[in-house]
Structures are given as C-alpha cells and as structure tokens.
Image: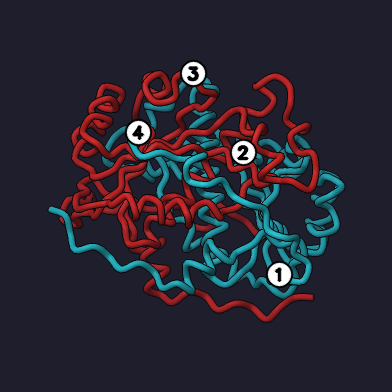
Chain colours: A cyan, B red
Amino acid sequence: MAQHPHEALDPQALDRLFREARTHNELGGEVSDDTIRALYELLKWGPTSANMSPARFVFVKSPEAKALLEPALDEGNRAKTMAAPVTVIIGHDEDFHEKLPYLFPHVDARSWFEGPREGRSAAAFRNGTLQGAYLILAARALGLDTGPMSGFNNAMVDETFFKDTTVKSNFLVNLGHGNPAALFPRSPRLPFEEAARIA
Amino acid sequence: MAQHPHEALDPQALDRLFREARTHNELGGEVSDDTIRALYELLKWGPTSANMSPARFVFVKSPEAKALLEPALDEGNRAKTMAAPVTVIIGHDEDFHEKLPYLFPHVDARSWFEGPREGRSAAAFRNGTLQGAYLILAARALGLDTGPMSGFNNAMVDETFFKDTTVKSNFLVNLGHGNPAALFPRSPRLPFEEAARIA
C-alpha cells in the first residue's frame, strides 16, 4: 500500500524554488527558444482536472511583439516588462473541452463540459492558473528568475494576441535573469495560524 | 544588470517535481503535523499579486473531520479521499484585502480592493489557485505525493468548514505516500505547438 517515502529535495533546491526565490523587477540576459521549449516540456506535466490542460502560452520575445504588448501594460509594469528578455502571456482556452478526447481518452470527458461557455469558464480559469503557477516554478527550477503580474488590460491583450479564438488572457510572467540589487525588501507572509488549520 | 544565470536543479529534482510526479489514487503512510507546517512554510513564499496571499488551508486529518468532508465528495473521489492520510481544502478569503496593510505595507493596497466583493473575487480565485499549485509542488519537493481534485460540492464544504467566514472552497488535494501500482497509465500532454507559441 503506502510506499517508502521519497526523499525531500536538498535545501538548496527548496531555496531556489521557494525560500530564496523573489519576484524580480529587473530581468536581463538571454532566454533562448530552446529554454522556452524546455520550460514548456517541464510545466506541461503539472496536474490539471481531467488533464484538461487549458493554458495557452504566448512567449513574447521579439521587439515587434513586445511593442504590441506595451500599450496594454499598466504604467508601473511597463518599463520592466519591455526590458525583460521574454514576457509570457498565460491564457486559457474556454473551449478546452474540444481537446479532451486526446487528453483524457479513456472516458467521454468532453461531454462533461459541453454547453454554454459559462459552464466551463471557472474550470478553464482555475486550471489555467494552476499551469501558470507550474510555469513560475518550472522556470525557477531551470535557473530562470520570474516577474509575474496581473496589472494589464486583459481585453486589449485578448484583442491583440487571441483575436478570433476562445482564449482569454489571465496573467503575465516576465522571464530572464534577475538583478538582486533591484529587489525591494521582502514582504512578510501570514503565520500558519492565520492562513491554515489542522482539523 | 543581468546576473550570472542560476544553475538548473538536477535531473532527479525535475523528475520529482514534474516529469515523474503523478496524481495518486492510493495514498497511505503518515503525514505528521510537523510535515504539514513545513509544507506551509515552503508554499507561503510563492508569489501572489500584491503579496495578497488569499489562500486559506484546512488540513483535514482527524477521522471526525474526514467524516464531515465525506458527504461533500463526488462518488468517484470518496474512497480514495477517506483513505488518504490528509486532505487539504484549499480555499480563498474573498476579503483578503483586510490583511494587505500587513502583507503589503509600503502602499495602501487595501484601498485598491475595497467595495463590493465581486470586484475582488477574481483576484482571490486566481491567487488562491496559484497558492494551491504551490502547495502541490511544495509537497512533492518535500517527498510527499499528491492527489488534487475538483470533484466535490463546494457549497457543502463551505457550509461545513468555512461557515460565517468570507472564505470559499476552491479545490482539494490528498496528501500521503502513493502506491505506484495503483496508478492509471499516464495521459498525454499537448505538444508545444498546440499550447504555445513564440512571438
């Protein structure tokens, strides 16, 4: 039944993923197309409900694509995003269910989500967001630094990058190599008792 | 500006977090209260918008609490959840903004989210979901196996575990040590070209 427990990752790995990792405001260096593909090949394995994998990713890298993104950014996010090697638009396909015969082949999962789009939009948002978190942690695992943000005009991004599709933008993540000197002091987290309980 | 890139984690760590990790249907073993607290102390560092940290976690462990959860579970999730050492209810506080003076002290972030609850519910859901993903990956990083699921009655869970609060349930995660023999064959993931593009 229960297996011998796995070992925890070493402390340096836990630092890199969680304890020492920071949201970076100044990201530089290079992020190659090979690195972007390696990042997808890791994050894709993260779990989603019925393996629905609704997230859709645009890796905005060229100056032309960055210029298309720029007017949608909140003022406070503009300079750092334009300077980052890559900005990922994390969206989710609200008609994700069309791919379930491939993604979840052993039952007719598509039928669970047919009908008006409102009936599946929360599942698309929840699971696309999970995949966005997997992207952040997979990037850190590959040695990249990240700068996730929600401060942008979703409708403008949808019009520019997802026109005539059923994909909606969710949030953005800058990728690159961070400058620790540009970090703000770290903000506190809630103590266990304020965020959790054991029942 | 750009720093020397960090090293990627070693291949075994990438396997544990992503490539070899599976959603387990049969979880056993022990998950101590110390492990639960260590899990929170890792996942709490994951990034959220304005550090809002809206997720609230109930670690359902005692037979009494498991019995309260049981009637809310979908039939297909019942036996495996009742057998798991711990089931985490991941919820989010829709009035998370009340803690922003502590969590994001350098500006008046609370004022950004004041007003009717509908104006902050998407932020609570998005960022609480991110924290749920951090919990899954932090658990794997600590050597635990996980079984996340959405198949339950949210209203019943809210009534039982979050009554008279502003917390709403999001999804559940079983925790323990998995039995590889009870795994289903792994479902495929979308190739890069179907889920992503470089612009």
Mark 3 or mark 4, which is nearer to you? 3
Q: Name the chain letter of the residue that bears numbered label 3.
A: B
* Circle 2: residue type: Val
Task: Mark 1: give few (<14), some (14-19) or many (20+) Cα within 10 Å.
Answer: many
Q: Residue flagged by tag 1: what amino acid is it?
A: Gly
Q: Nearer the viewer, mark 2 or mark 3?
A: 3
Query: Mark 3 packing: few (<14 Cα in 10 Å), some, or many (20+)?
Result: few
Alpha carbon of mark 3 to alpha carbon of mark 1: how far? 43 Å
Query: Is B56 rendered above or below residue B29?
Result: above
At label 3, the amino acid type is Asp
Locate the C terminus of chain B and report the quarter of the image it occupies: bottom right
Secondary structure found at label 3: loop
Q: Which residue is mark 2?
A: A167
- Residue at image position (56%, 34%) is B125
C-alpha distance separating marks 4 and 2: 20 Å
B113 versus B145 height, above or below: above
**Camera-nearest residue between B4 and B110:** B110
Report the residue marked by disc 4: A109
| Direction from residue B148 to residue B177 in the image, left or right | left
Q: Are labels 3 and 1 assigned to the same chain?
A: no
Quadrant for the N terminus of chain B in the image: bottom right
Residue corresponding to mark 1: A178
| Location of residue A165 in the rendering, given as x and y in whole percent from the top left corner | 64, 37
At 51% from the left edge and 54% from the top edge, which residue is drawn? Answer: A134
Q: Which residue is mark 3?
A: B164
